[in-house]
Image: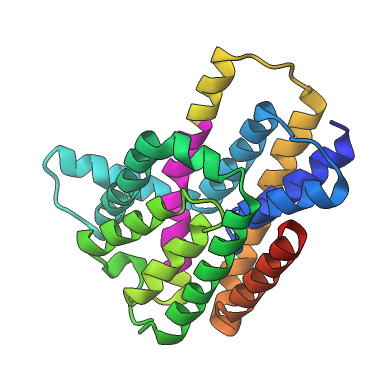
Amino acid sequence: MDLVQALVLAVVQGFTEFLPISSSGHLVLVPVLLGWTDQGLPFDVAVHLGTLAAVVFYFRHELWPMTRDALGTLRGRARSADSDLAWWVVLGTVPAVVCGALFGDQVATLARSPLVIATTTAAFGVLLWVADARGARTRDERHIGWREAFIVGLAQAVALIPGTSRSGITITAALFLGLNRQAAARFSFLLSIPVILAATCYELLQLAQDPQPADWPALAVGAAGAGIVAYLTIRGFIALLGRMGMAPFAVYRLLLAAVLFWIYL
């Protein structure tokens, strides 16, 4: 893999990982349009590490009190808004981890189907649009309970289906539950931390069982590029949400799905 290819794929991954526009749809489309072969598992690990570092760095001021207070409740200390949010993130992660362990092989088969990706990209784009238009948008992520967290977690498990978009479906669920746009995005991104970490650990385990040659310059470009772009994307997305809403992303998803159908039908 040359460094230009590594940089392009890193930018695509970093930009689409946290936007509700389906990263899998783009990662199918870009190599087809440019005539590139699969980037390989080591590169997937690198870009996932980059996006994980980005979201952890963005929420660094929230993660410490959340972790501290959650551990404090295990020692008998009183609950706080930070401890509750931490435990709701843990609870919301469980469905995706369980479903990933049970249905990972079937999902890998679906991931090979561009038509599945096109269909889910369009369908969940429409659902995102409806949720944004009809959601009450009256609460933030610190004013939800375990039921809401678990429902968003169930939605996150649906994102195992390629083309759904993990951020898209979790933001959709949070909007339907009455969270405002920025809160829905923040809770979605916090939920991404353990999921991306679990996915990266799984990929590292696969890599340990089947070692592949490492192109270290390409891996470094991939990790750094994905991390920088992901961080800037998270900042910009949350800042702009109040003004533009989800409609532009829903329209973009429909256009992306149309392109995929046009290429593969």
Farthest residue, direction left? 76
Q: Determine the residue positioned at 58% across, 69% down.
A: 122
Is any part of residue 181 visible from this angle?
yes
Q: Which region shows up in magenta? A: 184-200
Report x, y in % for residue 227.
Answer: 66, 45
- The tally of labels here is 0
Report x, y in % for residue 185.
Answer: 48, 65
Foreground residue among 163 and 156: 163
What coloring was used for the rendering?
rainbow
Quadrant where the N terminus sits is top right
Report x, y in % for residue 97.
Answer: 36, 40
Q: Is residue 15 above or below residue 238?
A: above
- Locate residue 10 relative to residue 233 in the image: left or right: right
- Locate residue 28 relative to residue 146 in the image: left or right: right
Q: Is residue 213 above or below residue 264?
A: above
| Main secondary structure of the magenta stretch | helix
Q: Which of the 4 image quadrants contains residue 260?
A: bottom right
Magenta residue check for 194: yes
Q: Is residue 75 above or below residue 143?
A: above
Foreground residue among 85 and 200: 200
- Locate residue 100 relative to residue 208 in the image: left or right: left
Q: Determine the residue positioned at 46% across, 45% down.
A: 193
Q: Determine the residue positioned at 47% across, 74% down.
A: 127
Report x, y in % for residue 245.
Answer: 55, 80
Quadrant where the C terminus sits is bottom right
Magenta residue check for 259: no
Q: Which of the 4 image quadrants contains residue 85?
A: bottom left
Q: Is residue 30 above or below residue 177?
A: above
